[in-house]
Amino acid sequence: MKPSEWQELAAHIERMLAEVKYGSITLVVQDGKVIQIEKNEKVRLQPNKTS
């Protein structure tokens, strides 16, 4: 990859990391190149509290 492509990829990953609170980000690599980025985000629900 060209340096500009690495910078673009890194910036995209940084944006995704800033957005996700719980979950994972997966890089899919083929022939030594990142071809896909997957983001799985978990949503934690708070149980209803009654007194």
Image (cartoon, rainbow, N blue to C red):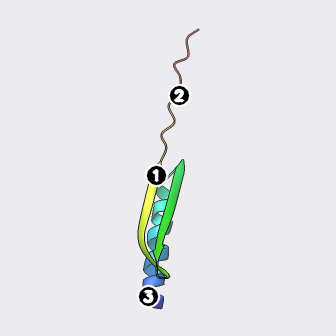
Q: Nearer the viewer, residue 4 or 40?
A: 40
Above or below 51: residue 16: below
Do the residues under discs 2 and 3 have CB atoms within 8 angstroms? no
Q: Amino acid at mark 2?
A: Gln
Residue 12 occupies which quadrant of the picture?
A: bottom left
Q: Identify the secondary structure beneath mark 2.
A: loop
Determine whether the residue tagged by mark 1 lies in a helix, strand or loop. Answer: strand
Q: Considering the image in quadrants, where does the C terminus appear? A: top right
Number of other residues with Cα within 10 Å of mark 3, as a class: few under 14, some 14 to 19, many 20 or more: few
Residue 27, position in %: x, y? 49, 67
Distance from the alpha carbon under mark 3 to that under mark 1: 26 Å
Residue at (51, 36) in percent of width and height? 44
Q: Residues within 10 Å of mark 1 (few under 14, many from 20)?
A: few
Residue shown at the point (43%, 84%) measured from the top left: 5
Mark nearest the camera among 3 and 1 is 1
- Identify the residue at the far bottom of this view: 2
**Residue 2 circle label:** none
Compare marks 3 and 1 and give the one earlier in the sequence: 3
Residue ranking furthest to the left? 35
Quadrant of res 35: bottom left
**Which residue is denoted by mark 2 in the rendering?**
46
Residue 4's label in the rendered image is 3
Separation of residues labelled 2 and 1 (CA atoms): 19 Å
Instruction: Specify the amino acid type for callout 1.
Output: Asn
Tag 2: Cα neighbours inside 10 Å, few (<14), some, or many (≥20)? few
Using the image, determine if residue 38 lies above or below residue 4: above
Q: CA distance from mark 2 to mark 3?
A: 43 Å
Q: Residue at x 53, y 55 (%)?
A: 24
Q: Earlier in the sequence, mark 2 or mark 3?
A: 3
Give the residue pinned by disc 1.
40
